[in-house]
Amino acid sequence: MTFTSTEGRGSEFTLLLPPSPPAPQQIGTELRTEHPLPQLGRNVGTVSTTVHNRLVMIVEATPHLLDELTHQVIGLGYRVAIARSGTEALEKIRRLQPCAVFLNPVLPMLSGWDVLTLLKADLETRQIPIVATALRIDQKQAYQNGADSFLSLPVQADSLQRCLEEVVKPLPSESPHQLSLTVLHLYELYENQGVPELISTDLTRLLHPHQCRVLEVDDLDQADLLARVWKPDVVLLDGACRDPQSYLERFSRSPFLSALPVVTLTAQMTEAANQILGLAVFPCLASTSNRPLEVGSPEVSALLQVMQMAVGIGWTPQILIFDLPTPASEHSPVPQSVRALMQYLQIAGFQTAIAAAWQDVIQNLQHQSIDLLLLCGDPAVAQAQLVEMERSLTPLEAKPPILFWNYQTHRAELNPLAQSTVEQVWGTQTEVIPGSLPMPELLARVNQVLKR
C-alpha cells in the first residue's frame, strides 16, 4: 500500500493486489505446495517494457517532487505506482514489471545507486528501462551505474515526454510477426468417440493470425513432456472424455500442467475441472455451428478473448471522465454523483480517471491512451464551452467515442436541445444519456459504445 497527500485536498491510497487470475507459478506454489514447481521460463507478466504496458514506477522520497512527476506522467496517459525507499522499490519493480522506472538516487534505507545496480544485475528486471532523476552533476555516475536515460531535476514536461518515447518502445522479441502466445491443445481420442469440435478444423490456421503457436497432443504423458520443453502459456482442453474426473485428476498430478491456466470448451469438462483443487479454469462455451470455423468468426474471437484473459493479458478499456464546467461550478470540486459514477465503472472492471482540466483531456487524446471519453453535465448549458472544446479536437487524427451523461436532469425524457447541441457541435460519434437512466443500463450503454 502506498499513498500521496496534498494539503487541503486529502490523501490518495493505492492498494496493490495480486493479478487476477494469478500468475502460473503463484497457482502452483500457493495451492499445491506439496509439489515444488521449477521455474517455468517465460512469464507473460514480465514481458512488459513496451507501449502495451502503461505502468510507470516512480521512486522518489521528496513529496513535492513525487507529486509533480506523478501528475506529469499521468497526464501523458500512463498509470503510476510509487515507492519511497530503496527496499520498497526493489520489491515493487520485481512484482509489477513496469514499462519504465524513474529513480532518484537519494533514498532512505538503500540508496538509488544500489537499487540501480541490483536491478541491472537481476535477470527478471535488467530489461526494464531505468531513468535516473537527479541533479545534472550526477549524470555521469548515473550512466556508469547502468541507467538507460537521465533527467535533471526539476523534470521538464517536454523532456519527460521525449524520454518516455525513447525508452518505452516495442522490443524486437515482440515484433508483430513473431508468436506471443503458446497454446497446448490437449484432447483425448478413444474408440467411437467421434472427432472433437476443434480437431475438425485447423486450429493453427485460425489462431496464427493472432500471434499464437498451437501444440496439439492427445496423450497426458506427451502433454507433460511438451509443457516441460515448450513452456506453453495456456492449456486448451477440447472434446469429451469417458471419465473427465479421473482424466483431470491425472492432469493435476503433473506440476508442469497443473500450474497452467486451463480453458475448457464443454460444460462437462468445465464441471469436472472445477472440482480439482488448484486448477485455474476458464470456460469458453460459445456455441458453434456445424460449418467449419473461419478466421475472424465470433467463435474464434470468443476463444481468443478467453485465452488472453486466462494468461492475464486481456484488454481493459480506459475511460476518461470530465465534468463540463459552468459559471457556477468553475472552481467547485467534482460533484459526488460524478465520483460515484467513476467508482461504479471501476467496480465493473474499467480503468477510469477524472480529468481536472480540459488540457488533461487533450493530452490523453493526443497519446491515444483512452478508449472512451465520458463528459458529464448538460450540453445545452455548456454550449459555448463545447464549441471551444470541439475546436481543440479537430487536429486530432483519432478520436475515441464520446458519451454525455446529463446527470444534472432527472427527467425521463432527454432535453431535445441537449441532443441537437451535441449533433451540431460534435457530430455523430456521440450520444447523450439522461441522468434518469439507472446505473446498470448506463453500464450496458458504455459496453455497447466500446464494442462499436
Image (cartoon, rainbow, N blue to C red):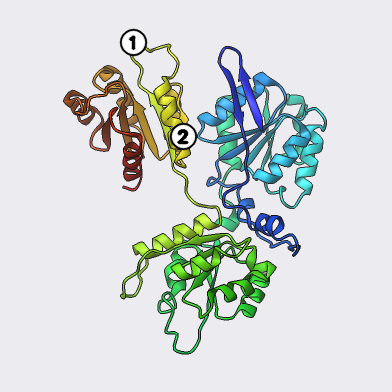
Residue underneath mark 2: 352
Q: Position of residue 59 (x, y in %)?
A: 70, 32
Q: Position of residue 20 (x, y in %)?
A: 57, 49
Q: Is residue 111 among what the camera can see?
A: yes
**Which secondary structure, mark 1?**
loop
Q: Do labels 1 and 2 touch, CB within 8 Å? A: no
| Residue name at image x 68 percent, y 45 percent | 95
Neighbourhood count class around disc 2 (C-alpha, 10 Å): few under 14, some 14–19, many 20 upward: many
> Given the image, on which type of amino acid does mark 1 rest?
Pro
Q: Is residue 351 among what the camera can see?
A: no
Vertical relation: 357 (above or below) 112: above
Q: For the N terminus, give its image quadrant.
A: top right
Gap between marks 1 and 2 measured at Cα: 26 Å
Q: Position of residue 241 (x, y in %)?
A: 50, 78
Neighbourhood count class around disc 1 (C-alpha, 10 Å): few under 14, some 14–19, many 20 upward: few
- In the rendering, which numbered label is found on residue 301? none
> Given the image, on which type of amino acid does mark 2 rest?
Thr
Using the rendered view, name the quadrant where residue 146 is placed.
Answer: top right
Q: Please report whichever mark, 1 or 2, sits nearer to the chain's N-terminal start.
A: 1
**Apparent side of residue 357 relative to residue 96 in the rendered image (left or right):** left
Q: Position of residue 450 (x, y in %)?
A: 35, 44
| Residue name at image x 64 percent, y 27 percent | 3
Residue underneath mark 1: 327
Vertical relation: 137 (above or below) 280: above
Q: Nearer the viewer, residue 14 or 361?
A: 14
| Residue name at image x 73 percent, y 24 percent | 135
**Which secondary structure, mark 2?**
strand
In the picture as drawn, the residue positioned furthest to the bottom comes out as 191
